[in-house]
Image: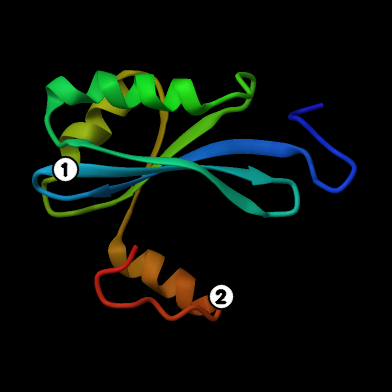
Amino acid sequence: MMGKQTENSAALLRYCAGIDVSKDSLQICLSTIDANGKTTVKGTSKIANKVSSFDGLLTWVAKHCKEKQLPVRYLMESTGVYHEQIAWYLFQSDLSVSVVLPNKSKNYLKSLGHNRAAGAV
């Protein structure tokens, strides 16, 4: 079995750490995704967008990942140059990282019937 399963829930497939990148900070949202596609937020945090803070990000994520056998995918939108250091750090740490173009994520949300408010992630 891939993850914890109860009578009313599907097996957990993975964790996803969404990172909202700005010049000065990284806002992190850690969630789980189950076999039915249900997403459950496990926690949020904010750290400085500087290399000296990145180890703290990994420590925070590890602390909140209760199902240690599940993979973690890190996801962020490209934001000029501000996402590059954290993306490179995660890649060099041999972690699964995805960088998407903002217009691609906006169009994906539209395809699901969601309207994205200005400035919302």
Q: Is residue 85 above or below residue 112?
A: above
Q: Residues within 10 Å of mark 1 (few under 14, many from 20)?
A: some
Q: Which image quarter holds the C terminus?
A: bottom left
Name the image quarter holding residue 91: top left
Residue 5, numbered circle: none
12 horizontally vs 94: left or right:
right
Q: How is the image coloured?
A: rainbow
* Distance CA(mark 2)–CA(mark 1): 29 Å
16 horizontally vs 98: left or right:
right
20 horizontally vs 53: left or right:
right
Q: Position of residue 7 (x, y in %)?
A: 90, 42
Q: Position of residue 14 (x, y in %)?
A: 61, 36
Compare residues 88 and 42 and report the one nearer the observer: 42
Name the residue at 86% across, 48% down: 8
Question: Which numbered mark, 2 or 1, is in the foreground of this view?
Answer: 1
Name the image quarter holding residue 5: top right
Residue ranking furthest to the right? 7
Q: Position of residue 117 (x, y in %)?
A: 33, 77
Q: Is residue 3 above or below residue 112?
A: above
Circle 1 residue: 25
Q: Is residue 64 above or below residue 49?
A: above
Name the residue at 80% across, 45% down: 10
Q: Position of residue 12 (x, y in %)?
A: 70, 38
Residue 112, numbered circle: 2
Q: Which badge, 2 or 1, comes first in the chain's sequence?
A: 1
Q: Secondary structure at mark 1?
A: strand
Q: Amino acid at mark 2?
A: Leu
Name the image quarter holding residue 80: bottom left
